[in-house]
Amino acid sequence: MDRRQLLLASAAALPAAAGPGPAAAKTQAHRAFPPGFLWGAATAAYQVEGGWRDDGKGPSIWDSFAHTPGRIAEGATGDVACDSYHRYREDAALIRRLGLKSYRYSLSWPRLQPDGRGPLNDKGLDYYKRLTDAVLAAGARPSVTLYHWDLPQALEDQGGWPNRDTAARLAEYAGLVGAALGDRIDHWAVLNEPKTFTHLGYWQGAHAPGRKEPLAFLKATHTANLGLAMGYRALKAASGRARVGTVCDVAPMLPRKDTPADRAAAARYARFLNRWFLEPALTGAYPRVLPPDREKALLGWRDGDETLIRADLDHVGLNYYTSWTVADDPSGSNGVPGLNTLADWGTGPHAKTDNGWDIYPQGFYDILVDMHGLTGARPIEITENGASYNMRPDAGHHIHDSPRIDYLRNHLGEVRRAIAAGVPIKGFHCWSLMDNFEWAAGYTQRFGLAYVDFKGDLSRTPKDSFLWYRDVIARNGLG
Ligand code: GCO
């Protein structure tokens, strides 16, 4: 059976869609979301803020990376981005207009601790107080990520994530921020996508800081896990109200061929990507991927880490975009001992979004049910889901992005189905509130519900998808 046949076989196992006529009321109920569902949208500091050296902010690894020629498409940087550092009131107006119940954003570590250690920078802190107050006034719950990839450059200069001390630095930062902002913010995530910032930053070199060092990368994953648990404890110690979790990107792993070797490779890769940054916190141990007799040395594991690394997370955030295709690679060419896989992101047999990622909504349901097996009764929130479509304004300044509406409708349908199957999903955040700096792709990929005029006045214009999402939120369902 080839991959396409496998997909058809699994589609045939789906429950039949509700029919027309008397079933209409049932369909309506089926499409409604639970009362109090947290409809949201997400952004991240480096992708929207700009103001890269305003008011005492220190440089981050993304400032350095983007300023290095050849790293980012079209030589773009986040120096200005959406200029949210100065225009956050315009962002809050979008939040209010959408009727968002939750707004997910991140804090720039070097804006708050320019060198990654020591007291908080008052002016940076003041920005996050004003932003948070504007989010609250717009009627949304602040959902705040401490670390969305912008490591202070000073800490990279001391070794970055492969240096175990970075976990202690993160915990210090978490404690200071929790004490300073805990009166306004209860809902926290320590890390965003540790898989992405370690894999792309230290193994593949496509993201900051651009290193290609498989062995240092493995140490970085362990530091990130230690930092998660230590940051969790520091935040809770600093703010009694804090509900603390983390955000992981997850995806179904599809074997390239239906052979035992490729199926085993896909299962290995699932442990390495989907579970690597959750299981240590929840169980005190890593899922089995590395050779058992070398695991501790490869990670830099020390006695006592089985306790230090644990955190009884209050909630878990999951990001979903597309699937992976995985093949066995006994030659071990990727440099990670024992992993023995070749894996491609977004390369399934379906239609693609504008950045070439396979559109696979059913995979969302599958991975949510799968992850629920690990996270148990903890509330799950979808912290990111969305698509890149690059439509521009027409002559009447309208942005007709119906493929994004289809993408979101189909993926929300799968979320609804997972809720019906018992997965405790409490919220959904569209990536993104507005077009922004898409990492190595710069400004060439637009994920926003609002269009940002990067070459002009940076104005934000709601797209058709914005108006559609506003209606979904108003009726608490897909309609
Ligand atoms: C991530 C990040 C976002 C991205 C989004 C689209 O998942 O990579 O959290 O910052 O912009 O996912 O690629």
Image (cartoon, rainbow, N blue to C red):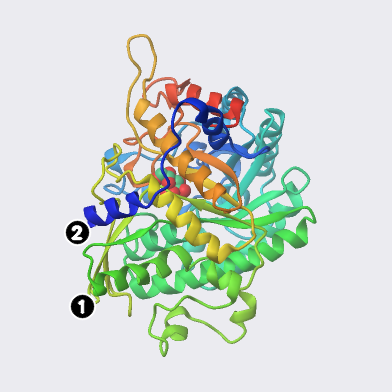
Q: Which residue is mark 2?
A: 2
Say whether mark 2 is within 8 Å of ligand 1: no
Query: Looking at this view, is 410 or 46 the one in front?
Result: 410
Above-or-below relation of 286 to 139 = below
Residue 411 spot, x, y in % from top left? 44, 41
Quadrant of the frame with the N terminus: bottom left
Q: Residue 50's mark?
A: none
- Picture quadrant where residue 132 is located: top right
Q: Secondary structure at mark 1?
A: loop
Q: Secondary structure at mark 2?
A: loop
The reply to whether residue 249 is visible in this rendering is: no
Q: Which residue is mark 1?
A: 331
Above-or-below relation of 284 to 270 = below
Please give left or right for residue 318 compared with residue 232 in the image. Answer: left
Above-or-below relation of 116 to 20 = below
**Residue at 65 percent of width and 51 percent of height:** 188
Residue 326 spot, x, y in % from top left? 27, 64
**Residue at 71 percent of width and 54 percent of height:** 243
Q: What kind of residue is marked 2?
A: Asp
